[in-house]
Amino acid sequence: MCGIVGLACLPGRIVNPARAVRKSLEKLEYRGYDSVGIAVIFNGKIIIKKGRGKIHEVHSKFNFDGTPGNTVIGHTRWATHGAPSDANAHPHSDCLGTIAIVHNGIIKNFDELKKALIKKGHVFHSDTDTEVVSHLVEDFIRKGLKPYEAFKEAIKKVKGSYAIALITAYEPDKIFFAKKDSPLIIGLGDGFNFLASDIPAFLEYTRRIIVLRDNEIGYITPTNVVIENIVTEEKVNVQSRVRIVNWTPEMAAKAGYPHFMLKEIHEQPRALNETLLGLGPEINRAAELILKADRVFIAAAGTSYHAGLVFEYYLAKLPGIMSHAFISSEYSKYSKIADSNDLLVAISQSGETIDTLMALRLFKENGAKVISISNVIDSAIPRESDLTVYTRAGPEIGVAATKTFTTQVLVELVLALKIAELEGTLLPSEYNEKLSTLTKIPKVVEEVILKNEALALQLANTLSYKNNIYYLGRGLGVPIAKEGALKLKEIAYIHAEAYPAGESKHGPIALVEKDFPVLFVVLDDENKESIVGNIMEMKARNAYTIGLLTYGNDEIAEKLDFTFTLPRQEYFISPITYTPILQLIAYYTAVKRGYDPDKPRNLAKTVTVE
Ligand code: F6R
């Protein structure tokens, strides 16, 4: 996690480079926000300003914008090694103050490197793993190496994951970089070049990008980019790697909403529409690969794992294929199981989640094929997959996943329908009919949000005083319930537990007493009658019952204390249409409790450490 930025620009090409980097860091705050800092080269000297706190707090103390200089690096931190503090904030320097470094990732062998450097007389100023790199570079420069050679030698010594940007007072117009297992992207400008952990950081200035790959190392200047592979020592043809992204700066701005999360919830109709329109022949290819495989595994984390559970359900119910979804950090369990006839579906909006990447690598090493579903073009997981189907949700800045979940589910649904058609479970005419239902989803979601937002706000007033809540569903309602519970837990800090409604009597109902909130996801499927029974058992214990159900289910609505209603629909689209209501409930409950839903405590959007 952590966000890093680098900007090298010709004098005057960007009016205030330090300000530009500060603004870029604000775009990356979703990656971590416990401390922040910048380093600038001015008149041959490095100036560092940094401290514990959010960007606006540290900026109001140090005035980042008032720092002159045209070569700037910056960092917004999510602590791994060393508690959040002024000293542990990045950038870090060497003994002489001639080097400054920002880093996202973990240097696993930092302890042993640090001890060796201390023995040589180096003095450290932080508890971070990162600081060893600046001292290593210093050490190699003292031995007579030029800065870039010293940087390369230093990187050869470190083990772990890293996206690094480093500046030295010796070569003031260069920013050195290295990348392994943490994202790093170059933004190409006219008279300036950026480095950043994510594209929105420089979207205001350029849409021409190069997504760096593992083991790539090099430097940017205002007018030049050099990239090589540190293992093979091959030079990269920079021009061949340039891509143009179709994201706009407006997509990465709040557009009048108080929080990114609320904006992103409201963006779902557009995101769904664009995802649907953007699907092409890769759906057929993915469907064929799935049909060819002996076994299908699905690996993902957090919200993407819930999308994985939905896919498992779709495969079982539409083409009738058995699959197994697992939480990607548990990948080691499959080391003896995965084989060359298997297929892994890796789901990751960021395309960078380390656990999902590790699961992917394990399956690949065992010869399996990998399909990924991702929202970020050219990110690590798509790059290492045999095939990727992209969602087109646009940048998601709020830490809690919203539009990326519903678009992932949409892709899965199209894919499951395609598989069903290819294997003959669905006739081509039925397939086309189902697809035409999907084109109506964006409108349905728009209506659902419009009709239920005020109700979500009303329910939030009640929930904001609760300490616990159950989210229950059956069948496809289970992953929806799980996703709703995760949203409430992560942004409103209320203990929320989701499980299949039939399980209550096997234990969890013991906790239920008067006014204990229980939310039911009621779908128009074969489980409806059973779930009514589950509502009744909670009512009998005086629970506070909340339900999401479609119009026309008045008898069920009467049994509930609080109801959200949606248009009648085929039950299989419900993860896309029901979940926005659960997102709104979580959002308004967090706001009511005084929390910032865009920046939940202890969380960062992209988890690039195991
Ligand atoms: C929850 C959330 C996380 C992510 C998880 C996986 O709102 O955002 O649980 O879903 O960290 O991230 P990706 O999809 O980028 O692999």
Image (cartoon, rainbow, N blue to C red):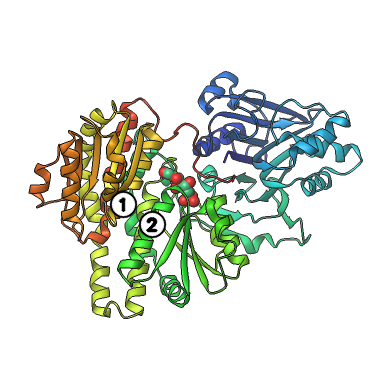
Q: Where is residue 12? Give x, y as percent.
A: 63, 37
Disc 2 under 8 Å from ligand 1? The reply is no
Q: Is residue 492 above or below residue 237?
A: above
Residue at coordinates 16% horizontally, 49% vertically from top-left?
532
**Which mark is on residue 449?**
none
Name the quadrant containing residue 150: top right
Q: Where is residue 431? Give x, y as percent.
A: 27, 74
Residue at coordinates 74% horizontally, 40% vertically from top-left?
173
Q: Is residue 156 above or below residue 37?
A: below
- Specify which label sits upstream in the sequence, 1 or 2: 2
Instruction: Specify the quadrant that holds the N terminus.
Output: top right
Residue at coordinates 54% horizontally, 24% vertically from top-left?
53
Q: Residues within 10 Å of mark 1 (few under 14, many from 20)?
A: many
Residue 294 in view in this figure: yes
**Which mark is on residue 478?**
1
Q: Is residue 146 left or right of residue 539?
A: right
Q: Are marks 1 and 2 in contact (CB under 8 Å)?
A: yes
Q: Amino acid at mark 2?
A: Leu
- Residue identifier under label 2: 309
Secondary element at image label 1: helix
Residue at coordinates 12% horizontally, 51% vertically from top-left?
551
Distance (Cα) linking label 1 and label 2:
9 Å
Name the quadrant containing residue 562: top left
Q: Amino acid at mark 1?
A: Val
Q: Where is residue 377? Give x, y as percent.
A: 51, 58
State the residue in front, 377 or 237. 377
Q: Is residue 603 above or below residue 271?
A: above
Q: Is residue 241 left or right of residue 445?
A: right
Name the quadrant containing residue 476: bottom left
